Amino acid sequence: MTAAGNIVILTGAGVSAESGIATFRGPGGLWEGHRVEDVCTPEALARDPALVHRFYDLRRAALDTVAPNAAHDALARLDAAWPGELLIVTQNVDDLHERAGARRLLHMHGELRSALCAACGTRHPWHDALPPATRCPTCGAPALRPDIVFFGEMPYEMERIEAALARADLFVSIGTSGAVYPAAGFVRGAAAGDAATLELNLEHSAGSAWFDETRLGPAGVLVPVWVDALLAR
């Protein structure tokens, strides 16, 4: 694995949890006290836009109270130093990878600090509250919504991700449940192209059997050790 030229890294909620951000599905299947079906589906947005917008407003504001942890910092170091291709694909909607310094990064499930126009499809950086019917700066339609990929919607840049997986010599999954598709299928896509596969997770995921190797422990401990070894060799 240390000889890998092209690397694809998938990060999930387990990475940001160590910074104090709640994992997507907590006890009882709730996300910070709400059923996922009530805050993360197109139907929920149509039924109760005030609830959905308020929910993401609170999540966006909470980003000011957290900071990147050792796992984010280590991946940013790898991003800066790795001479081959590298792509960090995150399922997380926070901005902790960016704040740590990662640049070769893709948010497949959207971003809290972004707004999406449902009318024209333009995405806008957004840091403040986003009330329903906020007008789009591009087209003027009162159609801005949280730039979050809801259940039932297509994740961002799947073609780019699949192309990177096809070229990968190493695929690493960090802090993911292995239960949410299409991300859960990335390991098989990478392995089909003869990439080595490594899982770093707090516990075995639903997809652990597909990996060449699984290392268990906190991301803030495992990721810096892995990155240091990779860069040293």
Image (cartoon, helix red, strand yellow):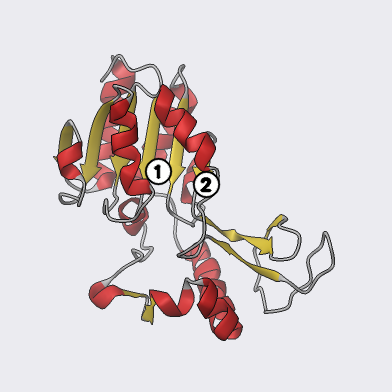
The residue that label 2 is drawn on is: 99
**Kind of residue sitting beneath label 2:** Arg
Query: Relative to residue 216, is residue 105 drawn left or right?
Result: right
Whole-percent x, y for residue 24 in the image: 36, 65
Whole-percent x, y for residue 157 in the image: 55, 43
Q: Between 143 and 128, which is closer to the camera in this rendering?
A: 143
The residue located at (51%, 52%) in the rendering is: 95
Q: In the rendered view of the protein, which quadrant contains the N terminus?
A: top left
Whole-percent x, y for residue 87 in the image: 46, 32
Q: Between 122 and 202, which is closer to the camera in this rendering?
A: 122
Query: Relative to residue 62, is residue 195 drawn left or right?
Result: left
As drawn, 32 above or below 202: below
Q: Are marks 1 and 2 in contact (CB under 8 Å)?
A: yes
Pointer 1 or 2: first along the chain = 1
The residue located at (38%, 36%) in the rendering is: 9
Mark 2 element type: helix
Q: Quadrant of residue 38?
A: bottom left
The residue located at (54%, 67%) in the rendering is: 60
The residue that label 1 is drawn on is: 72
Q: Quadrant of residue 114?
A: bottom right
Give the Cα separation between the discs numbered 1 and 2: 9 Å
**Kind of residue sitting beneath label 1:** His
Residue 146 shows in this picture: yes
